[in-house]
Amino acid sequence: MRQIPMIIDCHGHYTTAPRQHEGWRNEQIEAHKAGKPPPPRPRMTDDEIRETIANGQLKVQRERGTDLTIFSPRAAGMGHHLGDARTSEAWASACNELIHRVCTLFPKNFIGVAMLPQSAGVSPKNGISEIDRCVSEYGFVGINLNPDPSGGHWQDPPLSDRYWYPVYEKMVEHDIPAMIHVSAACNPAYHTTGSHYLNGDTVGFNQLMNSSVFKDFPTIKFIIPHGGGAVPYHWGRFRGLAQDAKLGLLTDLVLRNIFFDTCVYHLPGQQLLAKVIPVDNILFASEMIGAVRGIDPETGHHYDDTKRYIDQLALSAEDKAKIFEGNARRVYGRLSRMIEQSATAD
Ligand SMILES: [Zn+2]
């Protein structure tokens, strides 16, 4: 039996995939540089995949008392700045297929989210068939959308631009949200997880709030990960900017469409998030096993054991249930159906 509320972690990546998976990626990129076709994809048995999960994310779920992870390919590994549109397509397809295999082996514990085949300067239309495939064949419930496929050089138009509209149309059609998530930085000015990720979150939010996207797509939903980057901390700045630009109240402007996850790795940060952002707009997430894997000497617990912070917040049980379960079911429109399916799987 599931616990009540169910604990849904909306942000996890397959960071423990069998070694030959990323090995093939390196070979693919080397072959591309040499102007040669890529080698055939490596074999990965169900047992190998099972082992990486049983000793990885599933073990951590059990230790921390979470039930389900919304699971996507390793974010830094998306590497949209490498190769070209064709290598990105083959890599996204391989990564999403692997996520599907994990979700098939552990249907109660993992539900998939797709990475897209993106490349700087290549129309996001290129990713449409992969979205369709992942939703209809694999039962995925969302996508990760990289606002900067150049890996830290910001060469593509902002998310406010109609350039991205084909993806938005698909999101609305399938009732799937996008998590705004950059990949590895190839610009040495940025540290991938220390600054590029948080910049990506903040930039994405700012581009969307200054856009017509929510007028054009009233039901579209975005998740800003890593606690929203700098956004909750600087909520007053964004409110003031919206006011100066005569955009109205920030809450009216964005809170029907933008949601924040709880990948914030200390209690004071979580307290701020919960104080500034309405509880209806916060989704539980940890991003385990991910960027920060150590133990905080101040608490004796893993930095990314974010459930512990939520448990300590001065919120009602009803509000915590929204953060742990209800909001995820609302934002990921296809999620409840997938949960029901997995419940009747055996
Ligand atoms: Zn992530």
Image: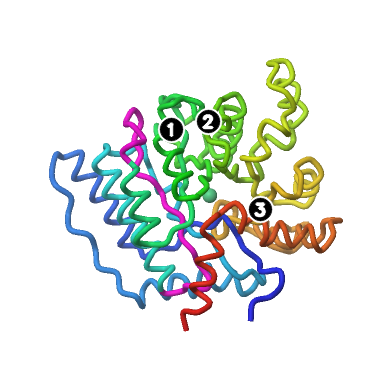
Q: Residue at x 56, y 25 (%)?
A: 211
N-terminal of the pair, mark 1 or mark 2, is 1
Please state which of the two labelled residues, at mark 3 or mark 1, is closer to the viewer. Answer: 1
Q: CA distance from mark 3 to mark 1?
A: 25 Å
Pointer 3: what residue?
Answer: 283
Mark 3 and mark 2 in contact? Answer it, CB < 8 Å.
Answer: no
Numbered label attached to residue 136? none
Q: For the residues marked 3 and 2, what is the alpha-carbon distance in whole angstroms?
A: 24 Å
**Residue most toward the left?**
36
Q: Nearer the viewer, residue 92 or 48?
A: 92
Say which amino acid is labelled 1: Tyr
Query: In the image, which is nearer the foreground, mark 1 or mark 2?
Result: 2
Q: Disc 2 marks which residue?
A: 216
- The span picked out in magenta is 105-126
Front position in the image: 264 or 346: 346
Q: Give how far apart the Cα atoms at labels 1 and 2 are.
A: 9 Å
Query: CB atoms at circles 3 and 1 under 8 Å apart?
Result: no
Residue flagged by tag 3: what amino acid is it? Leu
Residue 43 is left or right of residue 92, and the answer is left
Mark 1 — residue? 165
First in residue order: circle 3 vs circle 2: 2
Percent of width and height locating residue 311: 78, 62
User: How many residues crowd around disc 3 within 10 Å: few (fewer than 14), some, or many (20 or more)?
Assistant: many
* SS state under label 1: helix
Question: Which residue is found at the position 20% from the left and 41% from the top?
Answer: 32
| Pointer 1 residue Cβ closer than 8 Å to ligand 1 | no
Mark 1 nearby-residue class (10 Å; few <14, some 14–19, many ≥20): some
Q: Is residue 42 magenta?
A: no
SS of the residue under disc 3: strand
Q: As displayed, is residue 151 above or below residue 89?
A: above
